[in-house]
């Protein structure tokens, strides 16, 4: 099974925003990933330069492998890098859209 980090993203105005953080997933346990955070970088690559199709495989991977999220927290005007280890998150694994990235509502 594909392993992720326990978040759901939504696309808004060309940006990817954390829409949901799954309970007890790697993201929630870090205490650093919150709903409303902007995903700015993924493994040190700027998300706006990646296609949406490229984002999904970068979020998912082998269990125990890690990914670095570069987040912008608009509320606090902070940027943080969070390294998370992927693991199986049941709710995340059968989400529609592109794996934790919901297409923007038209």
Image (cartoon, grey):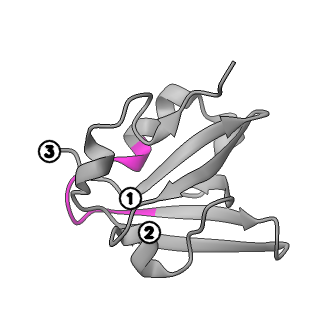
In space, the residues marked 1 and 3 are separated at their CA atoms by 14 Å
Height in image: 59 above or below 54? below
Q: Residues within 10 Å of mark 3 (few under 14, many from 20)?
A: few
Q: Name the residue under label 1.
A: 6
Give the extent of the magenta segment: 58-67
In which quarter of the view is residue 26 placed? bottom left
In which quarter of the view is residue 24 placed? bottom left
State the SS at label 1: loop
Mark on residue 1? Answer: 3
- The verdict on residue 73 being magenta is no
Q: Position of residue 102 (x, y in %)?
A: 52, 33
Q: Where is residue 43 in the image (x, y as percent from the top left)?
A: 52, 57
Q: Name the residue under label 2.
A: 27
Q: Position of residue 80 (x, y in %)?
A: 66, 74
Q: Is residue 63 left or right of residue 91?
A: left
Mark on residue 95? Answer: none
In which quarter of the view is residue 93 placed? top left
State the SS at label 2: helix
State the SS at label 3: loop
């Amino acid at each position: 099974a594909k392993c992720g980090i326990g978040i759901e993203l939504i696309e808004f105005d060309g940006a990817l925003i954390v829409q949901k953080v799954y309970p007890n997933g790697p993201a929630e346990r870090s205490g650093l990933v919150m709903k409303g955070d902007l995903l700015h970088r993924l493994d040190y690559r700027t998300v706006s330069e990646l296609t949406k199709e490229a984002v999904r495989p970068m979020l998912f991977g082998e269990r125990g492998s890690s990914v670095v999220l570069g987040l912008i927290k608009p509320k606090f005007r902070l940027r943080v890098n969070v390294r998370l280890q992927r693991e199986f998150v049941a709710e995340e694994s059968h989400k529609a859209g592109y794996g934790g990235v919901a297409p923007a509502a038209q």
